[in-house]
Image (cartoon, helix red, strand yellow):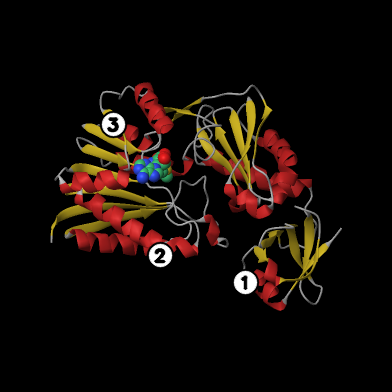
Amino acid sequence: MGKIVLTGKGRRWVERGHPWVYLDDVADGGGDAGELLPVHAPDQRVLGWGLFSTHSRIAVRLVTRSTDQPDRAFWLDKVERAVRFRERIGYMEPEGACRLLAGDADGLPGFIVDRYADLLVVQSGCQASDRMRDFLLELVREVIPVPVGGVLDRSDTGVRKLENLEKRVEWLDGERRERVLVKEDGLVYDVEPEGGHKTGHYLDQRENRIRAAKLAGGRRVLDAFAYDGLFGIRAALAGAEEVLCLEQSGPALERLAHNAKLNGVEDKVKGERTDAMADLRRRSREGERFGLVCVDPPAFARNKREAEGAARGYHELNLRAIGLVEEEGSLVTSSCSHAVRREDFLGFLAEAAWDAGRRVWLSSVHGASPDHPHRLDLPETSYLKCAVARIGASL
Ligand SMILES: C[S@@+](CC[C@H](N)C(=O)[O-])C[C@H]1O[C@@H](n2cnc3c(N)ncnc32)[C@H](O)[C@@H]1O
């Protein structure tokens, strides 16, 4: 077995709490792709155990600060704690959906498992999670309190390239399924596990959709960057007068129409295929107004270099969105860019409010749903920001 020896700087970094070791902080050692290795300080003291990558800039992901080598019971404990937590928060309804294992956030580097009713969709993002996939799935089956009827490995994300891994989509268990029906808190929707975005659905906005829907009663609602329409459909179910969903993807709009029908709100929810950025500008110029506007764009910045362009994008988008809200209406605005911090996002919103010439009160700010935990010693696990604001009169 190999080992890793850190530089002095690497030791200080790890001892201050961050569980990732960057390549520059490795003085010596190495191992096989995804191997579990002991991590040593420069004086050879063992600082813990971590999963090694032969390729990534993140050379080691520490999984324990104990000197004992993790064994089966160690991994079973991690999986079990994660699953029990989802159960405790009410996310394990047999026909429901949730992120069952959230990778590094649950102490399982790179290993994501999303559950859509009885289907598990795995997404592996690093060499170690590839190496451990079948073993970890075996542990999931041991503890999951609902039946498992199929397993799809949908490891097709761009991050795999950083680990020198090919993209991969394969059914590991059960018949290939095009669609899975999910029932969640009075909402019904179809997920396409192979063809949809991410693992088929944006699970992270579950609670924010419920928050937005509370502001929708009797209102005209705009759901911009709607994907399969669940902000809008939730709003319609909560008594919105009418809902307009803007989305550029044809397949997403088809699913949106199907989901609206499943929930019996097809008369209220209309989808339009359009560039939402341009559409918001036009509607705002033409003086259109809504009681609730939800905007949930794709990530404008994938890294720190792109953050400056993203600042302009968020400012512009929120300026237009604020302009579309009627007096005493609400805005629910999200950003899923990792590289944009919460304070920065709120800063863009404040500037947009000023430039729109409207008084804006920030009611609350949220992150992703709790099945996407934000692990405080790993800031990289926080990415979604969702601000709920009340929009007043002109200044
Ligand atoms: C973060 S997802 C939205 C998730 C959705 N709000 C939900 O709750 O599931 C962003 C969506 O914006 C769409 N999109 C990206 N650029 C767009 C554009 N310029 N105009 C309209 N839609 C766009 C993508 O196809 C994707 O469905």
Residue ID at (36%, 34%): 229
Secondary structure beneath label 1: loop
Name the amino acid type tagged 2.
Glu
Quadrant including the N terminus: bottom right
Residue 71: x and y in percent read 79, 50
Cα–Cα span, label 1 and label 3: 48 Å
Name the amino acid type tagged 3.
Ala
Name the amino acid type tagged 1.
Arg
Q: Circle 3 is placed at which residue position?
A: 236
- Upstream in the sequence, badge 2 or badge 1? 1
- Count how many numbered circles sit on residues in the image: 3
Q: Is mark 3 within 8 Å of ligand 1?
A: no
Residue 342 shown left or right of residue 375 in the figure: left
Residue ID at (25%, 50%): 321
Secondary structure beneath label 2: helix
Q: Circle 1 is placed at which residue position?
A: 16
Which quarter holds ligand 1?
top left
- Upstream in the sequence, badge 2 or badge 3? 3
Residue ID at (69%, 71%): 25
Quadrant including the C terminus: bottom left
Q: Circle 2 is placed at which residue position?
A: 308
Asked if disc 2 and disc 1 are in contact, CB closer than 8 Å, the reply is no
